[in-house]
């Protein structure tokens, strides 16, 4: 890591700490970049880079012609090109992950779950539903389905705040990749209650099927994310050479 990168991260860590401690309150306008840079005896470019990092993380918002303001709810960065559990995602942002309203039971597989797991429609499958929290705030309502012979309801109940990926790996079912789709959605009555939001609140719903390296489907997930709690990013490759661009 270069000196400039290290300084940028140090400055971002300092400002992030001031925001989390409440010294910089939600809605408060930050001092100007020149002021912040002067007070810390650093270059304006380093300070600008640090503030850009905080903006990408959702801690601050720039308002054109007005300044930079502390947000009320830092967004949790969710890189869709990476496949990892919700708890790991939340913990990676520096907040405390938690679980509420957990249930695990055998259910008849909905048609889309049966199709994804390659079992007959209506087959009994294990289902785990959990509300995931970030520093106590309810941010994701998840439902996960898997074959009963892979993980039974009792095993699902024992997971608690833990990872389904780890539980599957313990049975020799290592998730190699997942295929996900994301759609805007509105909270129905039950999802709204579980996430403590108004019915009809905007959600981002991710449906995903996870598979082993051999292509065996082992997990189907539906995650209802609060739209204002997460900032989603996707790495987009290309275009490549001129011949590819013209296609």
Image (cartoon, helix red, strand yellow):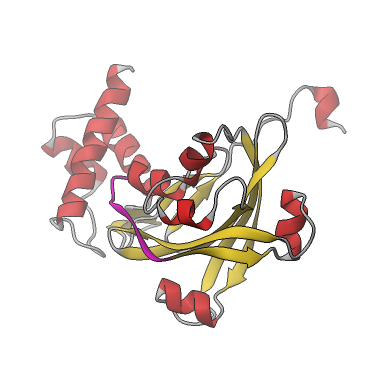
Q: Which residue appears at 23% of the width and 48% of the height?
A: 32
Inspect the magenta stretch and tell me whether residue 231 lies in it: no
> Nearest the camera: 126 or 206?
126
Q: Nearer the viewer, residue 173 or 28?
A: 173
Q: Residue 160, position in %: x, y?
A: 37, 54
Q: Quadrant of residue 8?
A: top left
Q: Nearer the viewer, residue 29 or 134?
A: 134
Q: Is residue 199 left or right of residue 101?
A: right
Residue at the spot 35% in from the left edge and 41% down from the top edge: 92
The percent coordinates of residue 91 (x first, y second) are 34, 45
In the figure, 198 relative to 117: above or below?
below
The residue that appears at 37% across and 66% down in the rendered structure is 138
Q: Main secondary structure of the magenta part?
A: strand
Which quadrant holds residue 50?
top left
Which region shows up in magenta?
93-102
Residue toward you, 197 or 219: 219
For residue 214, above or below residue 138: above
Q: Quadrant of residue 130?
A: bottom left
**Residue that sits furthest to the right in the current view:** 247
Q: Is residue 214 above or below residue 58?
A: above
Identify the residue at horizontal 32%, vertical 24% (top origin).
5
| Left or right: 9 as drawn, with respect to 200 | left
Left or right: 99, with 36 as reference point: right
Let me know if residue 130 appears in the view. Answer: yes
């Amino acid at each position: 890591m270069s000196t400039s990168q290290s300084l940028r991260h140090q400055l971002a860590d300092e400002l992030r700490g001031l925001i989390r401690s409440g010294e910089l309150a939600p809605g408060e306008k930050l001092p100007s970049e020149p002021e912040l840079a002067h007070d810390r005896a650093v270059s304006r470019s380093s300070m600008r880079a640090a503030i850009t990092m905080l903006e990408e993380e959702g801690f601050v918002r720039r308002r054109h012609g007005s300044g930079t303001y502390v947000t009320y709810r830092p967004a949790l960065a969710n890189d869709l090109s990476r496949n990892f559990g919700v708890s790991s995602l939340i913990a990676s942002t520096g907040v405390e992950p938690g679980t509420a309203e957990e249930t695990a039971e055998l259910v008849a597989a909905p048609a889309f779950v049966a199709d994804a797991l390659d079992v007959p429609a209506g087959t009994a499958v294990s289902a785990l539903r959990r509300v995931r929290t970030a520093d106590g705030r309810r941010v994701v309502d998840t439902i996960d389905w898997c074959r009963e012979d892979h993980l039974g309801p009792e095993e699902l109940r024992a997971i608690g705040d833990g990872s389904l990926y780890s539980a599957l790996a313990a049975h020799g079912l290592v998730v190699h990749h997942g295929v996900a789709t994301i759609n805007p959605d509105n909270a129905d009555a039950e999802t709204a209650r579980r996430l403590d939001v108004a019915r009809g609140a905007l959600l981002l719903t991710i449906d995903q099927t996870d598979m082993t390296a051999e292509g065996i489907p082992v997990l189907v997930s539906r995650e209802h994310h609060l739209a204002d709690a997460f900032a989603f990013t996707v790495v987009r490759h290309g275009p490549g050479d001129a011949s590819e661009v013209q296609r």
